[in-house]
Image (cartoon, helix red, strand yellow):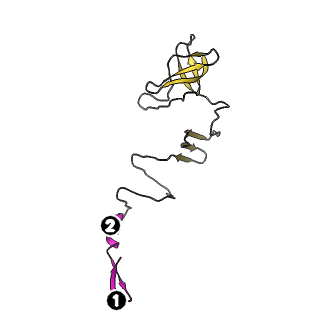
Amino acid sequence: MLRFGIISQINPELVQAKVRFEDDESTSYWLPILQTKTLKDKYYSMPNEGEQVVCLMDENCEDGVILGAIYSSADAPVVKNEKEISLNLEDNSLININKETQTLTISFKNIRLIGNIDHDGILKNTKGISSDAEVSDKTSTMQTIRDTYNGHSHPDKNTQTTSKM
């Protein structure tokens, strides 16, 4: 039987929750929360306490599974476009994929990427670039350029001497 309710408690370690069903003022036992992948690839997402969910329950409402959260007039989706996939967090961090414009937007205070990045296109930056490692291109490194040009001299046309730059 399909039932709608509100999350009343969560257990993040066991990926379970209790659901309050307002139609008969009952509360479920601990129910597992449906996840997209759990074997080799793992997906994890927990509903919030107070979130409206839909559950598939047995005929006695003693056992079941939380199928997922659902939108309502009180909790409307942030994105209303079938061409977008979006994850919007309460602190305004977000990941948005626009399939129509082929644009991936990621907005977080800090982003940590682990692995190699192969970029083909123009890299635009508005805040500068810093590196804890050597910076190089296909012909040289920044250190090689510093070693070559920082120690050279220029003649001083007024005194006929050279000065180091």
Kind of element beneath mark 2: helix
Per the rendering, the mark at residue 144 is 2
Check disc 1 and report the residue beneath it. 160
Across and down, in percent, residue 125 comes to 50, 58
- Residue 157 inside the magenta-drawn segment: yes
Q: Upstream in the sequence, badge 1 or badge 2?
A: 2
- Residue 144 inside the magenta-drawn segment: yes
Q: Quadrant of residue 143?
A: bottom left
Q: How crowded is mark 1: few (under 14 residues within 10 Å), some or many (20 or more)?
A: few
Instruction: Inspect the image, locate mark 2, and give the three-letter code of the amino acid beneath it.
Output: Thr
Instruction: Inspect the image, locate mark 1, and give the three-letter code of the amino acid beneath it.
Output: Gln
Across and down, in percent, residue 90 comes to 56, 38
Across and down, in percent, residue 53 comes to 58, 25
Q: Magenta span covers which residues?
A: 139-165
The answer to which of 29 and 45 lies nearer the viewer is: 29
Q: In this view, does 132 lie above or below 159?
A: above
Side of 131 relative to 106 (left or right) = left
The answer, for residue 99, to whether it is visible in the render is yes
